[in-house]
Image (cartoon, rainbow, N blue to C red):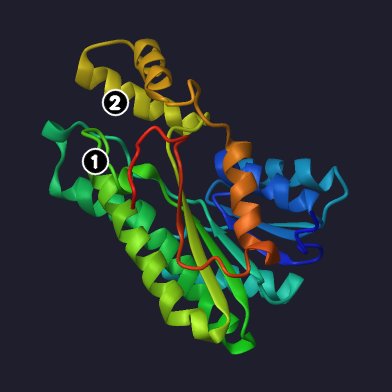
Amino acid sequence: MDLQLKDKVVLITGASKGIGLACARAFVAEGARVALAARGADVLQAAAAELRATGAEVLAVPADLGDATQAEQLAHAVTEQFGPIDVLVNSAGAARRTLPQELTVADWHAAMDAKFFTYLHAMQAVLPAMRARGSGVVVNVIGAGGKVASPTHLAGGAANAALMLATAGLAHAHAAAGLRINAVNPGPVLTARLQQGLEAEARLAGITPEQARERATQRAAMGRIATPEEIADVVVFLASARASYVNGAIVAMDGATTPIVV
């Protein structure tokens, strides 16, 4: 299936590792021109070097998207070097896992800053130009914690829930202008970020992180935890012309572990 992504300009935030890097690899495989953004310059440059080694055209721009000005500068840098941004994939930012009895007001603010506002700043930086052109796609990698409250992920889950509403609302608001805005909601995924969550769950339950991982695997309806590549495959499809009438969708990707209708 030709996803019609060849030579498209794709900006991926949080692209230096995990799901973001898996998305970058998948877009490169489709022939897209990919711009990578993340806070850590060294790790970001290593990711870019890996992709360039395949012959891909890749741009790496260090940026802290908690700062709206840096998000604007990022969009400008990508547009200046690659041309108009066709696709934005948001995969940057994650709230720290915290036991409920240890949550503070500052933790709730930090969660919104880490996840909600990083995505919002990136979207605000690209949406006006997309509207002016009459085309553009945004795919937000959010998380199942926005639908199902986890004791160790309450603040982050609240940020995820806010992002889901923003995704659906912005999709509706910009649909007539030719834009599509969708999201995927992964459950546990085999990334370094998973370990931090397992450690928090282990503390809450009084078990070891290894036991927490075993429990997570047993809870998974499919009997295993997702890989970053599996999430990336759906992101790439949603970004493609093959998903031309998918708009405002929140795609669950927890392998049917949580059997909910909406």
The residue sitting at 42% across, 81% down in the picture is 173
Q: Position of residue 213 (x, y in %)?
A: 40, 18
Q: Amino acid at mark 1?
A: Ala
Residue visible at 30% across and 55% down?
A: 161
Circle 1: is it few (<14), some (14-19), or many (20+) Cα within 10 Å?
A: some
Q: Position of residue 253 (x, y in %)?
A: 48, 42
Q: Which mark is residue 149?
A: 1
User: Which residue appears at 70% of the width and 41% of the height?
Assistant: 46
Q: Earlier in the sequence, mark 2 or mark 1?
A: 1
Q: Quadrant of residue 32?
A: bottom right
What secondary structure is marked by label 2?
A: helix
The answer to whether residue 91 is above or below residue 43 is below
Rendering quarter of residue 208: top left
Q: Is residue 66 visible?
A: no
Q: Is residue 207 left or right of residue 217?
A: left
Q: Is residue 68 left or right of residue 179?
A: left
Q: Are marks 2 and 1 in contact (CB under 8 Å)?
A: no
In this picture, is 30 found above or below 193?
A: below
